[in-house]
Amino acid sequence: MKLSTRLHRTLRIAGKMAWALLDRHHPVLVHLIPMRRCNLSCAYCNEYDAVSKPVPTDALLARIDKLADLGTAVMTFSGGEPMMHPDLDKLVARGRQRGLFVTLITNGYYLSRERIEQLNAAGLDHLQISVDNVEPDESSMKSLRLLEPKLKWLAEHADFTVAINSVVGSGVRNPEDALTVAKRARELGFMSSIGIIHDGHGQLKPLGEREMKVYETLRSYSRSGILRFNHFFQDNLAKGVSNEWSCRAGARYLYVDEGGIVSYCSQQRGKPGIPLADYGKADLRREYGTKKSCAAYCTVNCVQQTAILDNWRSPQKAIAMLPLRPRVPSTAPAAAEVPAPTPASDSVLAG
Ligand code: SF4
Ligand code: SF4
């Protein structure tokens, strides 16, 4: 990556974060879903289906324009698998034209040299991949061995920054795999982060002894490349302890699903349940002040990171009573066709 590109990007994001600190009534991060469908079926995921079509491009362009009008700083394409959308590059380019910092969460399967060059040309700022294990298993095909060629192409050709998220916790067969993944990320010059998977019912559960050892080792990498701003949240989650914080979802973070409906996050879909087209400053102000009853046991990394900008100000008053357990998306196939619902996905883990 050219030094000038890197410098320009750093200045852009620094400016956006400075503005986010000064002005509390605009979204800092929005996850926008262009495609609910996914080519994979990770056992811990509750955010995909196997059948849905891409969201029409015109509808997505209108949503991007609306997000820009609301003053959004960072827009992340998530899914499902967003790289299955045929016009993804056009969507990335529109986000950049409208002044957004544009990022992508992908499972990496659709990356090729050519696709990386196309994403460069569209102006993508950042890409994030979760690598769950070293060898594929029944729980996840996002393995280091299968993704290795893609990671090398990214290292050689990407003009955008890349982060690899490794995971520990329930359902991961070899916790030590996370160390191998983080080491490889560093060798390739990528940022890395760690996500904690909890049990299949969304319950907060302390990490076992082996997992905790791995977590602590990864945590010690923080001075040399692990990308994470919410260490204290993660530390408590690893120990199975709840967190005291103000969730600003609906204000500082928005989850815009494939129908264009704004939710607090992927795990609280349907609340507040307002179409993005109708979402305005009054909604942002109201939700900024709304305390979410699920906050203590929340595992949604990206919302916690966003909240750090505001943790020093504004107590919350109104209370939104939200279920502690994750909901199965209404668009998901019948229960028999999908893995058991869990609180995790690429976007929840990697933020
Ligand atoms: S975690 Fe990501 S790759 Fe796996 S099924 Fe869910 S959306 Fe697809
Ligand atoms: S699950 Fe987490 S991010 Fe979502 S509304 Fe509750 S506290 Fe906020």
Image: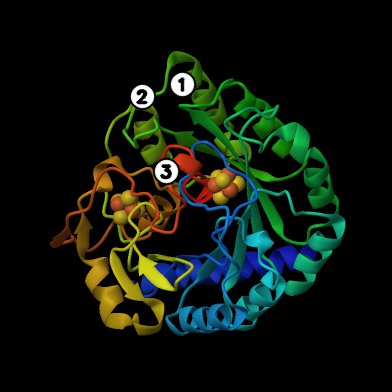
Which residue shows up at 44% across the image and 14% down it?
A: 209
Q: Is residue 314 above or below residue 327?
A: below
Q: Which residue is mark 2?
A: 206
Q: Position of residue 103 (x, y in %)?
A: 61, 63
| Residue type indicated by callout 1 | Met
Q: Quadrant of the N terminus?
A: bottom right
Rendered image coloring scheme: rainbow
| Residue type indicated by callout 2 | Pro
Q: Position of residue 79 (x, y in %)?
A: 55, 58
> Residue 101 lies in what quarter of the image?
bottom right
> Residue 105 lies in what quarter of the image?
bottom right
- Separation (CA) of disc 2 from disc 3: 28 Å
Q: Which residue is mark 3?
A: 335
Horizontal side of 71 relative to 98 (left or right) equals: left
Which residue shows up at 40% across the image and 29% down it?
A: 238
> Residue 201 lies in what quarter of the image?
top left
Q: Which residue is mark 1?
A: 212
Horizontal side of 272 relative to 207 (left or right) equals: left
